[in-house]
């Protein structure tokens, strides 16, 4: 099944999140190893975006709720069977 946000196809989870947000996920979450200057610039950009679109957090919650409502199976948890532990017998040891 293909997923589209607007006219763009979301191929991965990251694509879907970026297209839904309208910004790269890294803008909001940061990246491993970013410098203090990079973090400050990222946070400034995020503040500017929120200043231009103060409804963005509410819109994102609404989108998330809609996705959950339309896809309840996303949260189906199926316990996985644990493989039986193998007993290893070392050569020369009594079993």
Image (cartoon, helix red, strand yellow):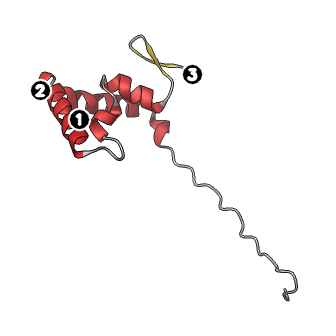
Image point (38%, 29%), residue name: 17
Residue sitting nearer the eye, 50 or 35 = 35
SS for dot 3: loop
Q: Is residue 80 above or below residue 47?
A: below
Q: Is residue 73 above or below residue 32?
A: above
Residue 43 in picture, x, y percent from top left: 19, 37
SS for dot 2: helix
SS for dot 1: helix
Which residue was labeled with disc 3?
A: 1
Q: Quadrant of the N terminus?
A: top right
Image point (75%, 70%), residue name: 86
* Label 1–label 3 contact, CB within 8 A: no
Nearer to us of marks 3 and 2 is: 2
The quarter holding residue 15 reads: top left
Q: Quadrant of the C terminus?
A: bottom right
Which residue was labeled with disc 2?
A: 51
| Residue 57: assigned label | none
Q: Is residue 76 above or below residue 79?
A: above
Residue 4 in picture, x, y percent from top left: 45, 17
Residue 74 in picture, x, y percent from top left: 48, 38
User: Is 82 positioned to the left or the right of 43 in the image?
Assistant: right
Image point (85%, 89%), residue name: 94
User: Is 91 positioned to the left or the right of 54 in the image?
Assistant: right
Residue 80 in picture, x, y percent from top left: 61, 55
Residue found at the far top of this picture: 7
Please rate how many residues cluster around mark 2, counting C-alpha atoms within 10 Å: few if below 14, some from 14 to 19, many from 20.
few
């Amino acid at each position: 099944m293909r997923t589209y946000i607007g006219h763009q196809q979301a191929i991965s989870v990251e694509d879907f999140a970026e297209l839904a947000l309208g910004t790269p996920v890294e803008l909001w979450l940061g990246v491993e190893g970013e410098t203090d200057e990079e973090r400050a610039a990222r946070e400034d950009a995020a503040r500017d975006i929120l200043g231009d679109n103060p409804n963005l957090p509410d819109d994102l919650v609404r989108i998330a709720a809609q996705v959950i409502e339309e896809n309840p199976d996303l949260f189906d948890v199926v316990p996985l069977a644990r493989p039986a532990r193998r007993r290893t017998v070392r050569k020369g040891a009594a079993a």
